[in-house]
Each structure stands twice: as C-alpha cells, then as structure tokens.
C-alpha cells in the first residue's frame, strides 16, 4: 500500500465523486451507502479473481441497485487511464504490475466516501 499516493489522491477522489451524479446525489447531499459495500467487495474481487476479472464484472451495473460502474470510472480517473472501460481492461492486461495501484485507488475511493453522508434508502430517482 502506497500511503503517499492514497493521501495525495483523496482530494481528487472527493471531487470526482462529487461531480458524478450517479454516485453523489446532490439533492440528498449524500452517497448511497451501497457504494461502501461495492468498493469493499471490489477490492476483495481484485485480490481473489484478478484485476481484469473484477473490472469486467463491475463495469456493468448488472442487478446492482446503483451504478457501480461509476465507481470503476472514478478509480480509472484516479489512475489516470484514458478512454473507456475496454481501454482500462487492456491497460490492466498489459500492466499487471499496476494491480497495487488499482487497490490503492480503491482504498482512496473508500476513504473519500467517508467525507460524504452515506444514506440508506436512496433511489436512482433521487
């Protein structure tokens, strides 16, 4: 874990979350508490299944209540990877040594969430 990277990236993560209307619900001034679960399970998935498999799974909303792919978008931006999810997957395939940076970015996202009010019972219409 690169503590300096995480500490330096937290303000950027806060701003990226605040600007993302699918993560931060301005009207409610809150983030759905489900995102804390999404990020925790993402980090476990990266560790157990690998970065490519975890990104592939989380890039799609699937049956999740909220847009968990937006969490991946924030992580991708923190890592300064350009392009869409396919580019991100290819980046991780070509740079397996970046797994630690991916996990550090996930930790950064999780720590940035603590700045926001996490709220139960929000809906996508909020």
Image (tube, rainbow, N blue to C red):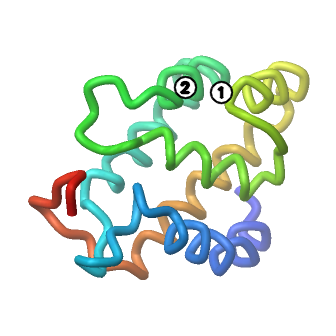
Apparent side of residue 48 relative to residue 34 in the rendered image (left or right): right
Q: In 3D space, how far apart are the residues under numbered discs 1 and 2 (Cα atoms)?
A: 5 Å
Q: Looking at the rendering, in which quadrant would you find the C terminus?
A: bottom left
Q: Is residue 107 above or below residue 118?
A: above
Residue visible at 53% across and 30% down in the picture: 59
**Nearest to the observer: residue 25 or residue 7:** 25
Task: Mark 1 and mark 2 in contact? Answer it, CB < 8 Å.
Answer: yes
Give the x, y percent position of residue 65. 23, 40
| Residue under numbered circle 2 | 54
Give the x, y percent position of residue 116. 37, 78
Count neighbours of disc 1 (C-alpha within 10 A) and say few if under 14, some if 14 to 19, many if 20 or more: many
**Nearest to the observer: residue 35 or residue 43:** 35
Give the x, y percent position of residue 66. 30, 44
**Nearest to the observer: residue 79 or residue 102:** 79
Determine the secondary structure under disc 1. helix
Determine the secondary structure under disc 2. helix
Labelled disc at residue 51: 1
Apparent side of residue 64 relative to residue 56 in the rendered image (left or right): left
Q: Looking at the rendering, in which quadrant would you find the N terminus?
A: bottom right
Apparent side of residue 16 relative to residue 43 in the rendered image (left or right): right
Residue visible at 55% across and 25% down in the picture: 54
Give the x, y percent position of residue 69. 49, 39
């Amino acid at each position: 874990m690169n503590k300096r990277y995480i500490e330096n990236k937290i303000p950027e993560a806060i701003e990226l979350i605040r600007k993302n209307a699918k993560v931060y619900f301005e009207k409610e001034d809150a983030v759905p508490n489900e995102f804390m679960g999404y990020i925790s399970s993402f980090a476990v998935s990266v560790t157990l299944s690998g970065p490519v498999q975890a990104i592939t799974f989380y890039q799609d909303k699937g049956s999740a209540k909220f847009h968990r792919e937006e969490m991946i978008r924030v992580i991708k931006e923190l890592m300064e990877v350009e392009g869409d999810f396919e580019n991100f997957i290819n980046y991780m395939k070509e740079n397996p040594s970046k797994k630690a940076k991916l996990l550090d970015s996930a930790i950064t996202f999780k720590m940035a969430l603590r700045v926001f009010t996490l709220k139960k019972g929000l809906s996508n219409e909020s």
